[in-house]
Image (cartoon, coloured by chain):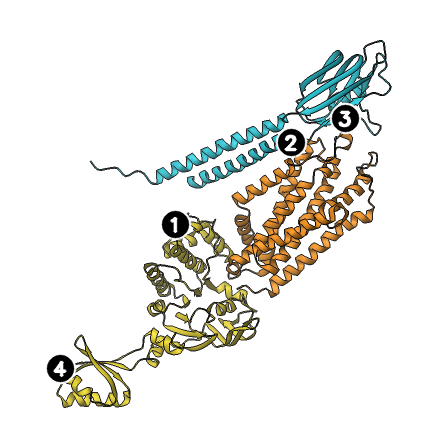
Amino acid sequence: MDAFVVETSGLVKSFGRATVLNHLDLQVPKGISGFIGKNGAGKTTTIGVLLGLLKPNGGKATIFGLDCWRESFQIRRRIGIMHEVNAYPGGFTAQRFLEHVARIYGVTQANQRVRQVLKDVGLSDAQDKPIKAFSAGMTRRLGLAQALISDPEFVILDEPTANIDPLGRVALLDRIKEMHKQHGTGFLISTHILSDLEKVCSWLSIIDAGKIVDQGNIEALAEKYSANIYKIEVSDPQVFVERVQMLSAVERVWIEDGKVYCKVQDPAVFYSEIPRIASELKLQLKGFQHMLGTLEEIYTKTSGGS
Amino acid sequence: MASFFSLLRWELEEYLSFPVLAFLIVSAIAAVLFQTNSGGHITSERSYISLFHTSGTVFLFLTFCAGVFFSRSFAGAVGKGETKLMLSYPVKRWQLFLSKFTALFPIIFVIYGAAYALLLYFNSISVFEPMFFVTLLAFLLQLMLTCGVSVAVAMVTKSEIISILASLLFLLGIDSVGGAGTYLSAQGRLKFLFSYFGDLIHPDVPPFTEFSATAGDAATAVVVPVVIFLVLFVAAFVYFTRFMEVD
Amino acid sequence: MARYSAKNLTKVGVLVLAVGLVFLAGTFYRTSTTWGSGSVSNLFGLAPQTTHLVKASPFGESDAYIWPPSNLRLDVQANGTLDVHIVDQNGITQWNKNHVVDSVWAAYGIQQEIFNLHLNGRGPHTFLVYNPSEDIVHYEISYTAYGLESDLLYVSVVLTLSGLVVTVAGLLLSWKNRKNRNPPINKQP
């Protein structure tokens, strides 16, 4: 694993008596990462601290190894951000707004860059429209455009798919994937919508009550939080099931689409018994696969099932 | 510095774009046209006195407009999330704060000053009449006071509407309570300045009131609003650039 | 590009229109509030064959009234005949320097009369009263300025109409641009 782009250790942020971030240890590698948690878990506050908008009460937060409060300006030159709340100037056209943002970033040939980014996010036709006339989906795409205008190394997206229809959501996530593929841009997607992350992320950090409850590569997490279900393909499923359900290591067995599924209590015993049973019954073992846990399972197990 | 000018352009386009700018210009002209001459007959020897007698509506409109504009730009931007957006870009906080001030302050002053110059034509006063510039100084002081109060209140409340109401109630309240007898009220300051400079510049013309101000009165009329402005503005600036959290 | 020009044209038009309308409203508002009425008279009477510049100021060249270009109602009451002149800034200077009468309005040989006239110029104006008779004449001239300020009215109307024309032109242009961008679909026979 490469060095982490974003790292926090023991990060604490309180508003009055309410502690929103409670010793948060977040690690985000380059790539597309998910940052998931319930509403109020502390995602937006974490992003606020990362951007230098909020001063932490304790701990450390860095992006590219730079301190998020003291070296915030240098960080902001290298990253793009799309906030959850739409605060874009409604009277500006998309083109004008992005030109302003490009100039702030010191982008050379701002007009060309604006046209390119508008094309990338699929807003070329709406470039002369005032932002206040944009639909929710268009506004989110504009948000993505302004985050990408400076061709940043890393982009933070706070609830990028909030308030948009399912098709718009899929399109936006596809664009994020494309950007990563084409330009190698890293993304941190903060959301409470699991299905969004399942499609695009390779890394997941789960936050609950201001603490990281688990994080890591999505496959590793899936393995860790899998439900111990195995899919087995054999030449005669019916005979195989009758024998397998007698095993004490197996909790439940069923057949679906001609394949045998087993929910297992003791995987070690199960692993050794299956080839033996197949050979005993003279059945051909065509396939054996551990079904990984879904994001939903991971999330349910880590953040208390809500 | 490039991003400061980019911010300045942004502020101008957003807060002084077409309908808002039109409103500002129209309000300034209305403030000059819709006033009554409370000074009775204006004569050519004492025509400059009309500048004093016809400034009440301009002070009122100027205070109102400046209060609303500064509150919108500072508190409104925080409330809407625009400050959060801007500070997520590579923008230094002092640049954002000063770009807001630089975009609004001179433009409001120039528009009101230019509109007030209509009175020179109406009352056949020379463009070089020193008392015209004394009146402009009084407008500048009122604008500074309004700016200082509005920006400071905006930093505390972070709510556009509360900031507008609080600053206007404070400023217009002072005018209403203090009348022309205090250095804090717009009319009071102008009276001290007009009386002192009127006697100094036009000694051959009888004073426009029985009241006669000293140099100390005139200096206090200038220093009080300037000091209040500096204290409030610097406090707001330091808070915004060093301590304010944007969530 | 054409769309931007049309949009900007409309904006300029609306701005000019708004300024014109506020001038117009101000013109009507000012008729009754800014200038009032007054009277001038002489305590000891005007000596025969002499001319008097009313309100000649002890402080300077003159102490003329600032009148707007509006209607003026004059009520002259005298116990003998008088010539009454109204002089503007130039006339005041002419009289003070050369004793030449250069009036913007005059009435000769009047005793008790009411006049309704219109002053076109803005700036200081005053009365120049001449007693052509052989006797001392006591007089009182009452004056009231009323009606619209003609220069302000003229500017208001010009601005309002110009604003209206420019706004309509801008709107027509943007309508035309929109039509060119979305041409009607030809129906197939």
- Which comes sooner in the sequence, label 3 or label 2? 2
In the image, what residue occupies the spot 37% across and 67% down? A193
Label 2 element class = helix
Q: Is disc 4 in the same subunit as disc 2?
A: no
Q: Which residue is mark 3?
A: C64
Q: Which residue is mark 1?
A: A126
Q: Colour of chain B?
A: orange
Residue B80, given in percent of the width and then of the height, sits at 51, 57
Q: Amino acid at mark 1?
A: Ala
- Which comes sooner in the sequence, label 1 or label 4? 1
Which chain does tag 2 point to? C
Q: Are marks 4 and 2 in contact (CB under 8 Å)?
A: no
In the image, what residue occupies the spot 86% across and 14% down? C47
Label 4 element class = loop
Q: Quadrant of residue B229?
A: bottom right
- B145 and C32: which is toward the camera: C32
Q: Which chain is yellow?
A: A
- Check disc 4: other Cα within 10 Å, few if <14, some if 14-19, many if 20+: some
Label 1 element class = helix
Q: Quadrant of residue A299?
A: bottom left
User: Closer to us: mark 1 or mark 4?
Assistant: 4
Asked if one can make out residue C137 in the rendered structure from this viewpoint, the answer is yes
In the image, what residue occupies the spot 79% across and 47% down? B218
Mark-to-mark CA distance, 4 and 2 = 103 Å
Q: Which residue is mark 2?
A: C30
Q: Amino acid at mark 4?
A: Asp
Q: Is disc 4 in the same subunit as disc 3?
A: no
Residue A13, given in percent of the width and then of the height, sits at 54, 72
In the image, what residue occupies the spot 46% across and 33% down? C168
Mark-to-mark CA distance, 1 and 2 = 49 Å
Mark-to-mark CA distance, 1 and 4 = 59 Å
